[in-house]
Each structure stands twice: as structure tokens, then as C-alpha cells.
Amino acid sequence: MTDPEARFNEMLALLKKRAFRLTPQRVELVRLIAVSAGHPSAAQLYTKIQEKFPTMSQATVYKTLALLKEMNQVLEINLRDDSHYDGNRPGAHPHIICTKCNQIVDGELEIDHSLLKKLEETSGYQIVRPQITFYGLCPNCKQKA
Amino acid sequence: MTDPEARFNEMLALLKKRAFRLTPQRVELVRLIAVSAGHPSAAQLYTKIQEKFPTMSQATVYKTLALLKEMNQVLEINLRDDSHYDGNRPGAHPHIICTKCNQIVDGELEIDHSLLKKLEETSGYQIVRPQITFYGLCPNCKQKA
DNA sequence: CTAACTGCAAAAACTTTGCACTTTT
DNA sequence: AAAAGTGCAAAGTTTTTGCAGTTAG
């Protein structure tokens, strides 16, 4: 994980550069996204920000996340029920998700570039973004089962 | 792709064996799932079946798909907006999805078993199901862009 | 005949949208 | 002051659920 403080400032600088306004709610969401070691969902971000800004609305959370997505500053992880966001590694990388408790961790696995090339050739597709997700049981839930 | 007719009969036999009833609506859905070369969504299946059975409801589509999923006879592909279903290769395999027109094709790529093992060791997770999706542009949309 | 299935409508859950008001710049 | 953002409520999606009526076995 990159230095959270640096990541925070980097994202703020990018927003500023594109003339987006640094409202307190927005800054706080960016801070959370930069600081979170895990992969928070929109709902989790909303709940956290509400502690500091009781008037915060879900709409604002989604609008700001849309902004950051568009700027390629967060990676959206689409699950069955909702989406989770990764602001530390905005590039594509694998995730492992527990089907019992929904805990998400990064999968340390490199995406082989030559393999992508081969896939592009056989399929005719131009591949833009791989999304690799492994569903399984986290250590905790594995033990219980 | 396996022989559609054989696949159709196989699924019907499995349903019968588990004492699930072969209603016309259900049989038609199974037929479509077995015959479809593509990866239909619940809505697409619903629309198709309505041609033959005008009273068909979405609820029934979802209930039958849940049944087939539980029997591991279809693979559910969770996309951002909805889910698509693959009844020909119920086991996990990669997909390539066009972000413009949503066309889905199978990715001919083997999932390396030793890699999975390594991931399990480093993460502590017990991996049950890999879901590998490549987002990109299909040959058609690539050309237009 | 009876247990299972269908289909309607309502509900659930996540996300988006419209718009008046507020705030950043 | 002007443009952008917030927040509320309503609407939009996909999927699930409850239940009365229907049907396969």
C-alpha cells in the first residue's frame, strides 16, 4: 500500500487541477478512500462520513465516487450486492472475497501480459481491464465450517 | 460447446431425479439455457420464453435459475447491471465482455491450478470459485472507435 | 389428491436523478 | 457573482418474497 497521506494529497491535487471543488464532505471521502486499508463499500463510506458530517447524503457519496472513478483514482469492485472501492491501487488487480462474511483482500498475483495478448488475438477483443475475483472462504469462516 | 440436445436432456434428467417438476415453462427455460451459444440474462430468457408462454413471469425465471444454480448446472456471471447465465459450461471459466455492446464471449484460457494453490497459501483463503472477467471492446465496437 | 409451481403484486436493496438551496472559488 | 456541490425525496433497476390459485406426478 502506498503512503496514505501521499495518496490523499495526490487525489486532492488532481481534483483541484480539474477545477473540482474541495468541499469538506468530498475531502473527507477522499481521505477515507486513501486511508482505508480494506475495500469499503459506498454504504460503509457513507456511514463513516456521517460521523463527521451528519448531513452527508448517499447521493453525494455516489457522485463523488463517480468522479473518482472517471479520474481513474479508485477501482470499483462489482459484487453481487453492491460495489466496493479501492483507492490505493486504482489499477486492476485480483481480489479474494469471502462468500460468508464478504471480507475482501488483495490477491498477490501478477496478470501475465503475454497471456492478455494471446487472449486478444484469439478473441479479437481489445482488452481494457481485467477483473479477477476469487470467491472462497476467509481463514475465519473456513475454520467455522 | 457440448451438444445442446444432450445438455438439455442431461439437465432434465437431473431435475427429474431430484423430483422437481417438469412444467412447460421450466422445460423451456432449460432448453434455452442448453441451446444458447451466448450468455443470456434473466431478462433475455424471460423475453424469449414469453413468446411461447405469454403468462411467464420473471419470478419463475429467477426461481428456476436459482434451482439450476443450486444444482451447479449454470454458471452465473455477475455484471455491473445484471447477471448472465452459462448453461453449457457450468464450471468456472473466463469471459470477455464488451463495455460498449455488452456482448460476452468465452475466454479460452486455462486457470492454472498451481497458481490457485499458491494464492490459497499466501492468503489463507480457501478458494472455491474463480471469476475472471476481461472488459474490453469487441471486434465490432473496436472498429467503430 | 397433494405437494410443488406459477404468476401477480409488493417489497427489498442499491444506485441514479431532479431540483431547490448552499457553498466554494 | 457564478458555477459547482449538497441533500432530500422520488424514481429506476434488478432480484426476492408472499400468497392464492393452478398443475404435474
Image: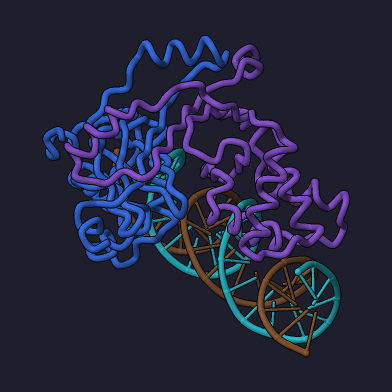
Chain colours: A purple, B blue, C cyan, D brown
Residue A36: x percent and y percent?
Answer: 71, 36
Taking A35 as reference, is B21 left or right? left
Is residue B12 at all visible to an observer of this figure? no
Q: Quadrant of the N terminus of chain B?
A: top left
Q: Quadrant of residue A112?
A: top left
Decide: is D2 above or below B105. below
Compared to residue B54, the image places residue C5 above or below, namely above
| Picture residue at 43% right of the left edge, 47% below the top | B79
Position of residue B97 measured from the top left corner of the image (x, y, whole percent): 32, 47
Residue B48 visible to an observer of this rendering: yes
The residue at the point 32 percent across, 55 percent down is: B102
Q: Height in image: B108 above or below A62?
A: above
- Residue B31, how many percent across, how many down? 21, 46
Q: Between A87 and B28, which is closer to the camera in this rendering?
A: A87
Observer-nearest of B136 and B85 = B136
Residue B17 vs residue C19, the one in the foreground: C19
Look at 36% across and 54% down and name the residue there: B99
Q: How many marks?
A: 0
Give coordinates of residue D21: x percent, y percent.
Answer: 46, 64
Residue A3 is left or right of residue A67, and the answer is right
